Image: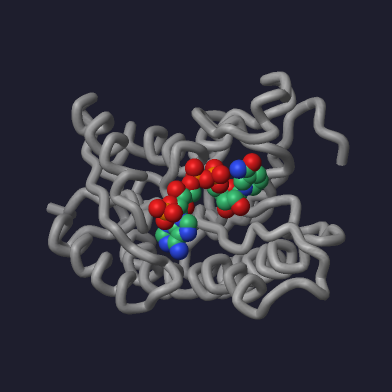
């Protein structure tokens, strides 16, 4: 009998990561990755208490050793299993600063997570996705989704770090999509075009009406629909925005 496939979400927090994990947990066991265990402990408990299966692993996507260790733990938890889906949701380098004041460390903090992390995560997870692609009993094509941002298509002043690393993440997704589609893996990049309504986040979002904020549960629903697409109609890039967003 084929082992039940798992889903791995890299970059779990109270926003998109948690919503995606909850949505995919309705169908698959989920693996939650974040550097801080505080980001996934309660969520894993919530999913397990509700009859799903979730495990959390502390991992830094920008560190190869850390990811290798995380995937060893995944193999131990789900022996012989393939991955039905993977979501790269982490981002780094949200620095808003005049360009001439940017330090090298600030600048590289963007690509360390979004570009190098995206590369490392994809290299680790693709063998598991390819395994699922070869499983004739698989319900849907294996899916690798990158969460992007407006900064992946539009570089604004003061945002050189975040924009350039998000452009890189999008290019990485496109290149992987083209290489692996013929092998049955669906890769998509999602432009999250606007502020996400993150539970408990105490920033400028607080004063925005709910209709101007993207509901992370709705992002998760869109990711699920990407996952269920047929090989004859893959969406490789998608924009997600509220009806009030100017674009
Ligand atoms: N928030 C917005 O309004 C917004 C708008 C447009 C696009 N986006 C994009 O949406 C995605 C999710 O954002 P979100 O705000 O909803 O966040 P979230 O899903 O609530 O949390 C993201 C998680 O990523 C983890 N992470 C960060 N760096 C990591 C690393 N090096 N290794 C492993 N995990 C890491 C963080 O936990 P640790 O710190 O514990 O690792 C954080 O909890 C991001 O790609 C972001 O750029 C966000």
Quarter-of-image position of residue 130: bottom left
Looking at the image, which is closer to me, 152 or 127? 152
The reply, left or right, for residue 197 in relation to residue 81 is right
Q: In which quarter of the image is the C terminus?
A: top right
Q: Is residue 27 visible?
A: yes
Looking at the image, which is closer to me, 181 or 63? 63
- 87, above or below 103, in the image: above
Looking at the image, which is closer to me, 188 or 103? 103
Residue lying at 52% horizontally and 75% vertically, measured from the top left = 116
Tell me residue 40's x, y (percent): 32, 44
Residue lying at 42% horizontally and 67% vertically, measured from the top left = 61
Quarter-of-image position of residue 198: top right
Tell me residue 232's x, y (percent): 59, 52
The reply, left or right, for residue 247 in relation to residue 1 is right
- 147, above or below 199, in the image: below
Tell me residue 16's x, y (percent): 51, 40
Residue lying at 78% horizontally and 26% vertically, measured from the top left = 243
Q: Is residue 141 visible?
A: no
The reply, left or right, for residue 238 in relation to residue 5 is right
């Amino acid at each position: 009998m084929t082992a039940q496939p798992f889903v791995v979400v890299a970059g779990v927090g109270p926003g998109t990561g948690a919503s995606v994990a909850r949505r995919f947990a309705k169908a698959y066991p989920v693996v939650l990755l974040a550097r801080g265990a505080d980001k996934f402990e309660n969520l894993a408990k919530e999913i397990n208490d509700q009859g799903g299966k979730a495990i959390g692993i502390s991992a830094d996507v920008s560190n190869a050793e850390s990811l290798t260790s995380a995937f060893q733990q995944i193999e131990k938890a789900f022996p012989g299993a393939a991955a039905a889906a993977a979501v790269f949701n982490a981002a780094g380098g949200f620095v808003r600063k005049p360009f001439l004041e940017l330090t090298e460390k600030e600048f590289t903090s963007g690509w360390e997570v979004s570009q190098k992390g995206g590369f490392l995560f994809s290299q680790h997870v693709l063998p598991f996705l390819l395994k699922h692609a070869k499983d004739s009993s698989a319900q849907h094509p294996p899916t690798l989704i990158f969460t992007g941002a407006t900064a992946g298509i539009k570089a604004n002043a003061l945002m050189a770090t975040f924009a350039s690393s998000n452009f890189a993440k999008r290019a990485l997704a496109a290149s992987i999509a083209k290489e692996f589609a013929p092998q049955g893996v669906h890769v998509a990049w999602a432009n999250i075009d606007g502020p996400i309504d993150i539970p408990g986040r105490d920033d400028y979002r607080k004063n925005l009406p709910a209709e101007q904020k993207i509901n992370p549960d709705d992002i998760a629903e869109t990711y699920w629909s990407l996952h269920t697409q047929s090989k004859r109609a893959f969406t490789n890039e998608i924009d997600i925005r509220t009806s009030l967003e100017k674009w």
